[in-house]
Image: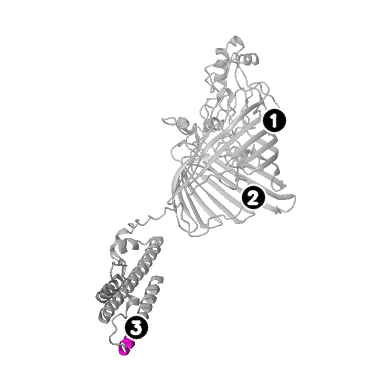
Amino acid sequence: MRRIFRNAMTLTALTVGMTCACMAQSATSDSNPSSTNLTASVDPPAAATPATPNGGADATHATSSADKQELQPTVAQEIEALKSRIDQLENEVKEERARALADSADTAAIKAAEKELVAGNGGVGLNATRPAAGVSPSLQAAAPAAAPAAPPEISAERLTKEAPFPGDWTWLNDNGHQTDSPMATKYFTPEFRADANYTLDLNHPEDDSLGGSTETFRSDEFQLEQVSIGGDIRIDNVRGRILFMDGLFATTTVRNDGSPNRGQWDLGDAYKYISEGWGGYHWDVAHGLNVDAGIFVSYIGLFSYYNFDNWTYQPSFVSSNTPWFFNGLRIQYFPTSKLKIEPWIINGWQSYARYGGHGGLGGQILWRPNPNTDVVFNNYGMGEDDSTNLGRSRVHADYSVQQRFYNNPSKMLDQIAWTITGDLGCEYGGGPVSFATPDGALNSHGFSPLKGTTDSYNGGVDCHGSKDGRPKQAFMGWMSYLRFWWDKNLYAVTLGGGQMNNPGRYLTLLPPINGATAISGSPYYTENAGDRAQMRDGTLTFDYMPSQFITFRLETGYRYSDTPYWSGRGGITPPGGNNGAPAQYACASGSPSGYGYGTVGLYNAELACGAGESAGTPTGLNSIWWPDLRTNQTVITGAIMVRF
């Protein structure tokens, strides 16, 4: 625009100047027509000519006048020159306007292309092949090729409605107090756990070996209970979880499962380092529908598989003696944000494989009507879960309520919560009355004496007391805990305990006498139908939690059994260590006798161990090694547990 204005001003000045000159020339001609030197002021000056010796001044004057007459333009020529100049300026103005219009159109086209590119609708690619109005072809050619539209982003897990169980549930027993996962990404949430403890058994077993627990296994030693790594994966509604596990859990959990003894492929070794491993799919139905298959935690008995998540280190019997995991299929349906319905189709009761002719069925109903209440109903049935007595089926019900009845974070005492759990179950079927020996007879008091008797029952059982001579095979138990948090959940104290009655001992944990497992059994602690097992316990737990990712725990507990069960001073390991034959009596020297449970077996074992003529008498028993089992146990445990 400045250039246009400048050219216009120049044109105006020239036009006015020439007009004035023409008017002056016309006036002079009218007054003195003979004069010819009127335009000298607009002509260029003549070059100086040197003077000649004679009459040089006159000659010079004459020559100069003649030159000026020849160079002086006519009025018509001057007017024609002005017209040419005017045409030139008009053309420049038109070209300048055209360039301005082109710049404006190009700018608009570029802006439109930017908007289309940001919108991601592919419009840039279309405009690139069809020039915009007023845009120069050179600019169109120089424009960069439009990038293809980005593919749609893959979601992790779609959920139209509210996610189930909103709110803070870190106060629950079985959930843990971790609230964040700082290493999580959109698709993967990693998980690491470590649990180390030092346990002191006041019975001071000489072999440092403990029995009757799924949490404490050695005394007077530091031990790594668990170290796990894995995480959760969610990609386009496909879901999965893997948590590898090593430490004592990798041995102690497997030894309680007798199912790998049926068939081939050593399932115990195949799965021992996996605490959870499953994959499945999520449907965006109601508040969520999931179908998963693999190994997953059961939560029968309320407590979590992992000690970090629990209020105590050693849970009571209705938790410690019930399943930590299942292997099979689960379906999780959330009809509302406060309710979960979860059926199970599984191999059996905490088993990698089936024990008998068919697996088990079960399920969980979890209801959380408000942020302070948790109600869970677990049920199991149909499974044949006794590897030595096929045909017996098991049913079990486990119901829990958790209630936080005080929550005031602004006070020194932050929270108070309480839990109660009740369990009831039994086994039934298995055929008529039968004994392993011809002179067998049930002990009327339900005791299977340590030194062997004739009550080695292997026939059918019943849920509701003696029926057709078949003994009662049942489980009844309860536990309850009360927990206090203070100083913004930095500290917590838990008091609690429970009790169980398990005639038949089918859920009583077998002590690892001479390396005994659920597959081998032991002649020193029988699991015959009708054998008594009545136990009770209590614990006091103190927690220090300086971070959501760690718990320092100190706990003391007392446990009692009405029959000898806990490790005593003499320990539960034969002289020289385990001899590889836990199903047999061991000789006093530690070697296997070659004979197992029963009166005949014991007598022959005494003979094999050198009792001679004293075999079958109290003196003959001295040839046999006997574990030191006690009716009570007091332990103190310190633990450091990490989860993130």
Q: Amino acid at mark 1?
A: Asn
Residue drawn where x is 57% and y is 38% of the image = 193
Residue 561 shows in the view:
no
Residue 30 falls inside the magenta stretch = yes
Q: Residue at x 47, y 30 (%)?
A: 269
**Location of residue 29 in the rendering, given as x and y in whole percent from the top left corner:** 30, 87
Nearest the camera: 384 or 73? 73
Give residue 195's quadrant in the image.
top right
Residue 220 visible from this viewpoint:
yes
Magenta range: 20-31
Q: Quadrant of residue 425?
A: top right
Image coordinates of residue 128 in percent, x first then y, are: 30, 62
Q: Decide if residue 368 is on the left or right side of residue 11.
A: right
- Would you place residue 366 above or below residue 266 in this image? below
SS for callout 3:
helix
Mark 2–mark 3 distance (CA, rounded to whole Å):
109 Å
- Name the residue nearer the viewer: 178 or 399: 178
Give residue 19's mark: 3
In the rendered image, the vertical position of residue 213 relative to residue 235, given as above or below: above
Residue position marked by numbered label 2 in the rendering? 402
Task: Say which element carries label 2.
Answer: strand
Per the image, the residue denoted by label 1 is 632
**Dot 3: few (<14), some (14–19), or many (≥20) neighbours within 10 Å?**
few
The residue furthest right is 412
Q: Nearer the viewer, residue 496 or 636?
A: 636
Q: Earlier in the sequence, mark 2 or mark 3?
A: 3
| Mark 1 vs mark 3, CA separation in Å | 132 Å
Quadrant, the C terminus: top right
- The residue closer to the viewer here, 79 or 235, is 79
Estimate the x, y position of residue 69 in percent, counting from the top left.
Answer: 26, 77
Q: Earlier in the sequence, mark 1 or mark 3?
A: 3
